[in-house]
């Protein structure tokens, strides 16, 4: 225990106030719209290490059957180093996950009871960890991970305030993961709103956003936009066959245009091409003809008669 820890513990409520102050400050830093999951985990780990004065704080995801721990983020206080470590795993016994119904102290002797291949005990020995304060990370009521507060050196006596603070850190990790999940879900919904599900191309709404963005900065020689509309008549194809045909068309055009234009599926049998730079009339006509030839050549290979 450090001199500062000892001094704070002699003042009634001082240790708990210090913990609460750290949690309030942490919330202000983490719950920002532009805070990514790894940034949030980094801030949480650093705050936990500084407040509890431990050498390392790691966040682990618990694998299927609670037999595997996968490290999501690691912070080492003495060096100030943050490391995102997806893929780094430890094998633990089936009893480890069941133990984490609440904040628990884990030491070398205790870890040996939950090892499958000695991975957890070896981890503690390798890093000189005398004891860990493990806090469960629960998402939607299910155990999803653990926040490990690792004390290097002799076995440490953890106070009730330490336990309460560690539990809050586990809750903060859970909230950060849930916010990231919802943010990704919202992004996916937004993506689906603006893209065709069959060709994965921008749809008409997305194309209109691109047009509006392109029109705003126009000046000088940029006198307008070029838009090429391609209507495909591939009868008698219907249903899945028609969708497969349009996917082939989309792939042909995407391969030709690359990053030089926005390609969109604006309705069931029509595509639009919006070049990213202003084209003169001759250039625009040449591009339209090139698209038509490309589509006809690609579809002729499979015996489809198509009018563009």
Image: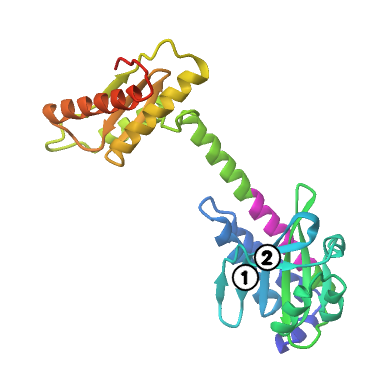
Q: Which mark is residue 74?
A: 1
Quadrant in which the N terminus appears? bottom right
Instruction: Classify 261 as above or below 111.
Output: above
User: Across the whole image, how many numbered discs are drawn on residues?
Assistant: 2
Q: How is the image coloured?
A: rainbow
What secondary structure is found at the residue carrying circle 2? strand
Q: Quadrant of residue 5?
A: bottom right
In-front residue for pair 259/176: 259
- Measuring 51% from the left and 32% from the top, which residue is drawn there? 192
Packing grade of label 1 (10 A; few <14, some 14-19, many >=20) is many
Q: Can residue 125 be found in the magenta stretch? A: no
Q: Would you name the residue on which mark 2 appears?
A: 59
Per the picture, the main secondary structure of the magenta-coloured stretch is helix
**Mark-to-mark CA distance, 2 and 1:** 7 Å
Query: From this viewpoint, which residue is outermost toward the top?
Result: 236
- Rendered location of residue 61, percent (x, y): 70, 60
In-front residue for pair 107/19: 107
- Measuring 75% from the left and 74% from the top, which residue is drawn there? 119
Instruction: Classify 6 as above or below 49.
Output: below
- Rendered location of residue 146, percent (x, y): 74, 63
Packing grade of label 2 (10 A; few <14, some 14-19, many >=20) is many
- Rendered location of residue 179, percent (x, y): 62, 49
| CB atoms of marks 2 and 1 within 8 Å | yes
Quadrant in which the C terminus appears? top left
């Amino acid at each position: 225990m450090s001199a500062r820890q000892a001094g704070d513990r002699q003042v009634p409520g001082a240790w708990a106030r210090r913990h609460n102050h750290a949690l309030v400050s942490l919330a202000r830093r983490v719950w920002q719209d532009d805070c990514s999951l790894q940034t949030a985990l980094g801030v949480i780990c650093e705050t936990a290490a500084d407040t509890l004065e431990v050498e390392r704080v790691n966040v682990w995801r618990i694998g299927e059957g609670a037999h595997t721990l996968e490290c999501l983020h690691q912070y080492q206080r003495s060096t100030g180093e943050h490391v995102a470590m997806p893929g780094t795993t430890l094998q633990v016994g089936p009893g480890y996950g069941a133990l984490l119904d609440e904040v628990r102290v884990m030491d070398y002797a205790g870890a040996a009871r939950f090892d499958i291949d000695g991975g957890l005990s070896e981890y503690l020995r390798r890093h000189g960890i005398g004891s860990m304060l493990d806090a469960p990370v629960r998402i939607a009521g299910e155990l999803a991970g653990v926040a490990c507060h690792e004390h290097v050196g002799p076995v440490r006596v953890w106070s009730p305030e330490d336990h309460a603070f560690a539990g809050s850190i586990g809750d903060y990790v859970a909230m950060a993961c849930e916010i990231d999940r919802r943010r990704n879900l919202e992004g996916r919904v937004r993506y689906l709103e603006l893209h065709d599900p069959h060709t994965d191309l921008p749809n008409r709404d997305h194309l209109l956003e691109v047009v509006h963005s392109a029109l705003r900065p126009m000046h000088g020689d940029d006198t307008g936009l070029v838009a090429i509309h391609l209507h495909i008549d591939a009868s008698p194809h219907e249903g899945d066959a028609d969708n497969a045909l349009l996917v082939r068309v989309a792939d042909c055009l995407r391969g030709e245009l690359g990053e030089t234009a926005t390609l969109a599926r604006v309705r069931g049998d029509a595509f639009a091409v919006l070049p990213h730079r202003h084209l003169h009339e001759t250039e625009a006509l040449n591009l339209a003809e090139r698209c038509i030839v490309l589509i006809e050549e690609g579809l002729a290979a499979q015996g489809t008669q198509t009018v563009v």
